[in-house]
Amino acid sequence: MVIRTVRRRHPGKEKSSLKAYVRMNKNASVTPGARKGRGKGIAALVALLLGAQAFAGTALVGGRLIDGFGHLPIANSVILVDEGVIQQVGTVDSLPVPEGYEVVSTEGMDVLPGLWENHAHLMLTGHSDYSHWHPTYADRFASEIMPASPVQLLLAGVTTTRDLGATLEDSLSLKRRIESGEIPGPRVFISGPFIQHEPYPNTEMYRWGVSGAADGRRKVALLAEAGVDIIKLIDQDKMTLAEAQAVVDEAHKHNLKVVAHSHRPDEIRRGLEIGVDNFEHTGLTTAPEYPADVIRLLRERTATGRVAGGPMFWTPTVEGLWNYEFTVANPEKLDSDCWHRGLEPSTIADIEESIRYPGQLAYTQLTPIRKPTLKRKFLQLREAGVVMLVGTDSGIPMKFHCQSTWNEMDVWVNVMGVDPMDTIRAATYWGAVMMGVEDKWGTVSAGKYADIIAVKGDVLRHINLLSRVDFVMKGGVIYKHDGRPVEEAL
């Protein structure tokens, strides 16, 4: 059994494969403190029938806690978890473990909030040819592709993700299945289809065009009523001002934030004019820096402090661009089987064939020319005062869900010069703030959902230790321990 305990309040209880199953189901509720209905009933029934006795809660004991607030880490920490929620946080000297708790050792580990992948595409899994992928796998998104992607993220330490651009029904189905406990995965905030001026050829299933302000309002309202969490806007510079403004205004009317592409200077200018909340990417062009007027507008926006409920957020998605040439020179990471999880053998073979020659993909031919612009643009954004989020475009060609997030954090620290603590906050706390859920997620603190990861070693000195997350807990459920998945939960 992979759950290792160092102290037990029920000495006669044996480790069993049932334990993970009971823990998984008793915490299946998605509301803090509300262990009700189906989840509680299954756990109680199974425990009664098979003689297993569930623990009152879980205590994570001994590790150094980096809690997401940005202050000094807490040595020899104790984190008490019950009902899927963090009850108390302290140290071994200040917080005794109550009777009835299972103790899980985090000695020698850094303990962090679960990571946020702020820009994922769960209907993509690294295949290089979209014109082949979409028609071939459209009828398998719900059954195979989209359930596989979140499992891969979760085992990489990602306990929350924003899925920015996918078919509506498949996105809603995936979100419901994860929330109900039917399948494992991070908490998913979905945008559903892109909103844009006009869908690209053969993309209508996941891109919605806008024709007039009234149509923009109608389509955003449809998404809001369907249950999306955020609106994804692209090509806003190709819309009329009235159309683009209608999209943002309708989203904000429904208390939905808007993320927008920032590939072209005019996309940024228009996005700032209409009040988007979060820009994505650093641009498709090879220009060495952002135009001076764009930076001036950004500085003005960040100086105002608030527009639609928060700072100006930016998700730069730089690691794929920075690491592309290293991948071509040494493509071994493409051979990792971590991205195979949940996929059919034929799907794996198809993806492998599509990336057999990584240096020859049409998708990436401009990347070597764009790479030299990244440091300057990244620095410009930081100096302009935007709040950066860790996100990667995970799922696009050669970017696998099990690898992308930690690679982005590594590039931030070791290439872009961002402090490791700030990088961790950009991958935990700030994502929760952007989505307006910082009262539930983003930090390891009392009253928050127990979304917690841990790695062996000093992550503030060696950020790429996140390449092998050793412990993953989401909502009090342990999905990975000692570097291995808990089989019963997956």
Image: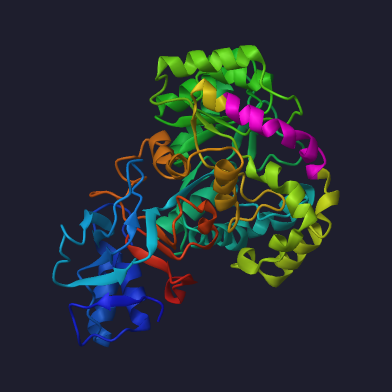
The image's colouring method is rainbow
- The image position of residue 106, as x and y in percent, is 34, 66
> Which of the pair 100/181 is nearer the observer?
100
Q: Is residue 337 above or below residue 443?
A: below
> Is residue 379 shown in magenta?
yes
Q: Is residue 343 visible?
A: no
Residue drawn at x 70%, y 71% is: 345
Residue drawn at x 57%, y 48% is: 410
Q: In this view, does 308 lie above or below 170?
A: above
Residue drawn at x 71%, y 41% is: 203
Residue 403 falls in image quadrant: bottom right
Which quadrant holds the N terminus? bottom left
Q: Is residue 270 above or below residue 105?
A: above
- The image position of residue 174, as x and y in percent, is 50, 55
Q: Can residue 29 be seen in this view?
A: yes
- Residue 29 as seen in the image, left or right of residue 207: left
- The image position of residue 204, as x and y in percent, is 69, 39
- Residue 399 as seen in the image, left or right of residue 446: right
**Image label count:** 0
Query: Residues in magenta?
Result: 363-380
Residue drawn at x 73%, y 37% is: 371
